[in-house]
Image (cartoon, helix red, strand yellow):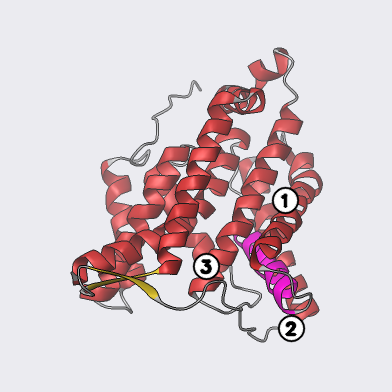
Amino acid sequence: MALLSYLISGLGLGSVYAIIALGYTMVYGIAKMLNFAHGDVIMIGAYAAFFAMTRFGLPVLLSVLLSMVVCTVLGVVIERLAYKPLRQASNLSVLITAIGVSYLLQNGAQLLWSSSTKVFPSILAGGSLQLFGGKLSVSWLSILTILVCIAVMVCLTLFVNKTLTGKAMRACAEDKGAALLMGINVDRIISITFAIGSGLAAIAAVLFCAAYPSVYPTLGSMPGIKAFTAAVFGGIGSIPGAFLGGLLLGIIETLAKAYISTQLADAIVFAVLIIVLLIKPSGLLGRKISEKV
């Protein structure tokens, strides 16, 4: 039963990574850029939800919605001001800009709210689900996180596959030049992609802070890096790959902490990533794309 308990906990943690990884993989799949400021959007979402619940006394659901609005607007503003002018620039220029935006958000948060850690309020009543006569205990937060991740994945898949905007996103992912010739507003589609990814970051922020109840300016660094790892693990650019990579990463991290060492867990996670990329460089569900030079 202990192994099953660890697996469920790993799925809960991996679900948070998967939701964050969807933001990375969507932006890369369409804009072909790595938005390393995505982790700091998570931090802003956590602060927005924290103040909505503590200062304004809003219920959890309204706080999450407010956090999503804040992060969505922030994502669009970042894309318009920092990334859109570099649409034709080199990948290195975009990468340096993303790192600069990340430091800007971190230091801005520190100036506004100080570097002190704030305790995130509980979003669920305590307790857990008891199964098999009490031999297996599953926290309600893990169940909620897994269900939210599945709902997000289903809604996003339906949106991408069934709507006109989703089809335009897939067209831009295949060939932005051809999509532009077909009358698709590529800039608008990229902005929508940033908006969706940033909105999902707000959901992940609340779930992550519910599990680890603290808020501080560098909050998004670790889950952001691990979610990026999950996106690469599953195949960056692939939505199902981000989902699978996040879940597997959460399970590997949880099992490593339980059976090997809490101090070596992160090293084990990245070692597994290196092994996977050595065997399959495109990731588990990624596509190998040939480029003419």
Instruction: Please tell me in which quadrant of the rendered image residue 135 appears.
Output: bottom left
Total numbered badges shown on the rendered structure: 3
Secondary structure type for disc 1: helix
Q: Secondary structure at mark 3?
A: helix
Q: Nearer the viewer, mark 2 or mark 1?
A: 1
Q: Circle 1 sits on which residue?
A: 72
Q: Nearer the viewer, residue 59 or 16?
A: 59
First-in-chain label (3 vs 2): 2
Main SS, magenta region, reads helix
Residue at (66%, 75%) from the top-left corner? 217
Few, some or many C-alpha atoms within 10 Å of disc 3 (few <14, some 14-19, many ≥20)?
many
Distance between mark 2 and mark 1 Cα atoms? 24 Å
Query: Mark 2 is on which residue type?
Result: Ser
Q: Is residue 270 visible?
A: no
> Is residue 255 rendered to the left or right of residue 240?
left
Q: Residue at x 39, y 29 (%)?
A: 288
Query: Which dot marks residue 208?
Result: 3
- SS at circle 2: loop
Read off the residue under disc 2. Answer: 114
Contact between marks 2 and 1 (CB within 8 A): the answer is no
Magenta-highlighted residues: 39-54
